[in-house]
């Protein structure tokens, strides 16, 4: 089987698993959100922020290093990475636990101490799983990866429901994960048959660090940016508002997070194989983004238009404050979707220093913007700041990506504008229509309104693309033929595409 077909098959398998994970997770959150308070969600979130910031010093870059490694001594490299990972994980956990009492005092919440031990345990076993997961991805063994993870995708959410009705309260969000993650990690090692041995290969650690040092810097800056706004929001507005903001972000990324994880998993395994042919590299990269955008953008449009009925249906009226931030953050989610593979391109060409420079400037600008937004506009201000600042810096990312593949910057926009233009027209028209029909729409049952919105958006969007941009459909069909032939024929039949 060709690399393209393996990648396509892997994408579908991992996507199926992630969609199952999203459905199970979403169903669980709907129940938990009615049993717990926004403060509970904010409490767990602010505890995790500390761990995320500390862990970046030791955990960033290992998987990227193993996937991009091109020499012949692969197994020895994995063994070296295993022991490097063990040592770093222990150090990170120790620093985290030492910092926890100060963090709990700073946040004025003693329960952070107990939650930190649970979160720290989850971190350790998740980090240990990095090595076997990288092995499976490098060898394009995505089916095996999915088979291992799927049972836990079902079990962990179900156990959370049992825990919350068993009276564990806020701990029901994390205890089931702590109990089941070690089992999953153990199964990963059995499946890959990775035997690290007793030799530590310390002479190889410098090589690993040399590759990851800029990734560590970029990772730290990214995590400061990703979680710094949560810290700022919690101090300005309190943990309850942070809980609402988290729900808004989760809903805004309902589709994108899982799809980005899948796509980055596949692309980081596939794209480095084409670094000696930049035309082919770009062809695979942009064809994937076109297909990704065509599928995902209409769903984001539906989420934006139906944000209020979605929030009311799933979480209840006590979470209505999440509606407007969710709509704003969906714009951010759309931008993030098409630029998320930036680091993979940089890693493929060993241009980690360039991505570090972007993050070095972006992070302070983003945090200052978040502080200003929180002070003047609350959670809506933070969401607006995120969209504005990221939109500027995403354009810088696009330029560096195109420089890496030696293509003109305008080519990227030319290749993807049909999808963004189509969904922008559809969403704008429906927002205007909704203003004039607001009184009638209030009488709709939320589920009926969501379904009606979805039908209209999907129908109008697909008709627009078919009539105005038929060539794009041919490009998507060609990409499906290379990566997942089983989907090409039904796609061609639905859209009337005739391949020569």
Image (cartoon, grey):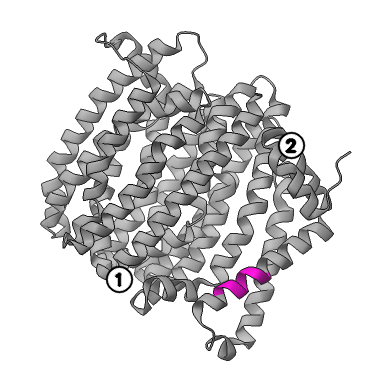
- Of residue 411 and residue 293, the one placed in the foreground of this image is 293
Q: Position of residue 383 (x, y in %)?
A: 44, 63
**What residue sits right under mark 2 in the picture?**
481
Q: CA distance from mark 1 to mark 2?
A: 45 Å
Mark 1 residue element: helix
Which residue is more in the foreground, 294 or 402? 294
- Percent across and percent down for residue 493 are 79, 51
Q: Is residue 254 left or right of residue 396?
A: left
Q: Quadrant of residue 30?
A: bottom left
Q: Is residue 365 left or right of residue 302?
A: left
Residue at left 29%, top 29%?
Answer: 186
Compared to residue 483, the image places residue 84 above or below, namely above
What residue does disc 1 label? 34
Picture quadrant of residue 99: top left
Point out the stretch of residues depicted in magenta: 450-456
Image location of residue 298, percent across then percent down: 63, 61
Residue at 50% x, 32% y is 143
Look at the picture and state if 370 lies above or below 363: below
Residue at image location 64% in from the left, 51% down from the top = 293
Along the line of sight, which residue is nearer the eye, 196 or 17? 17
Residue 54 can be seen in this image: no
Nearest to N terminus: mark 1 or mark 2: 1
- Regarding residue 226, the answer to whether it shows in the image is yes
| Quadrant including the C terminus | top right
């Amino acid at each position: 089987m060709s690399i393209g077909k393996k990648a396509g098959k892997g994408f579908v398998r991992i996507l199926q698993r992630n969609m199952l994970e999203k459905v199970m997770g979403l169903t669980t959150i709907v129940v938990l959100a009615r049993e717990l308070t926004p403060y509970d969600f904010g409490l767990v979130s602010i505890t995790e922020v500390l761990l995320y910031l500390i862990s970046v010093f030791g955990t960033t870059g290992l998987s990227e290093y193993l996937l991009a490694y091109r020499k012949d001594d692969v197994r020895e490299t994995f063994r070296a990475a295993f022991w490097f990972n063990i040592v770093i994980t222990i150090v990170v956990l120790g620093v985290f636990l030492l910092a926890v009492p100060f963090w709990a005092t700073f946040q004025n919440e003693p329960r952070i101490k107990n939650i930190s031990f649970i979160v720290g345990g989850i971190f350790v076993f998740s980090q240990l799983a990095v090595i076997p997961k990288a092995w499976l991805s490098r060898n394009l063994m995505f089916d095996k990866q999915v088979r291992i993870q799927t049972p836990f995708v079902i079990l962990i959410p179900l156990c959370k429901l049992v825990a919350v009705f068993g009276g564990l309260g806020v701990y029901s969000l994390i205890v089931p994960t702590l109990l089941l993650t070690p089992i999953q990690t153990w199964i990963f090692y059995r499946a890959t048959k990775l035997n690290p041995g007793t030799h530590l290969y310390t002479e190889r650690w410098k090589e690993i660090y040399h590759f990851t040092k800029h990734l560590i810097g970029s990772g730290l800056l990214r995590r400061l940016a990703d979680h710094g706004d949560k810290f700022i929001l919690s101090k300005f507005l309190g943990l309850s508002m942070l809980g609402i903001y988290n729900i808004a972000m989760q809903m805004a990324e309902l589709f994108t997070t899982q799809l980005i994880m899948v796509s980055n998993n596949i692309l980081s395994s596939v794209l480095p194989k084409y670094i000696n042919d930049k035309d082919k590299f770009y062809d695979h990269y942009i064809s994937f983004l076109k297909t990704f955008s065509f599928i995902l953008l209409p769903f984001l449009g539906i989420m934006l238009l139906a944000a209020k009925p979605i929030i009311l249906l799933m979480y209840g009226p006590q979470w209505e404050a999440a509606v407007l931030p969710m709509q704003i953050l969906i714009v951010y989610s759309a931008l993030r979707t098409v630029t998320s593979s930036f680091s993979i391109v940089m890693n493929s060409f060993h241009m980690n220093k360039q991505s570090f420079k972007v993050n070095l400037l972006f992070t302070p600008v983003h945090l200052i913007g978040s502080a200003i937004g929180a002070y003047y506009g609350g959670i809506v201000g933070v969401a607006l700041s995120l969209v504005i600042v990221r939109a500027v810096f995403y354009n810088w990312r696009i330029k560096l990506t195109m420089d890496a593949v030696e293509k003109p910057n305008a080519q990227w926009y030319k290749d993807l504008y049909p999808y963004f233009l189509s969904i922008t027209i559809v969403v704008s028209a429906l927002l205007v229509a909704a203003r004039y029909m607001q009184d009638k729409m209030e009488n709709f049952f939320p589920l009926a309104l969501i379904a009606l919105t979805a039908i209209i958006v999907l129908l109008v969007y697909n008709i627009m693309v078919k009539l105005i941009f038929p060539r794009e459909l041919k490009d998507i069909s060609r990409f499906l033929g290379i990566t997942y032939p089983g989907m090409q024929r039904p796609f061609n039949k639905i859209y009337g595409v005739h391949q020569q």
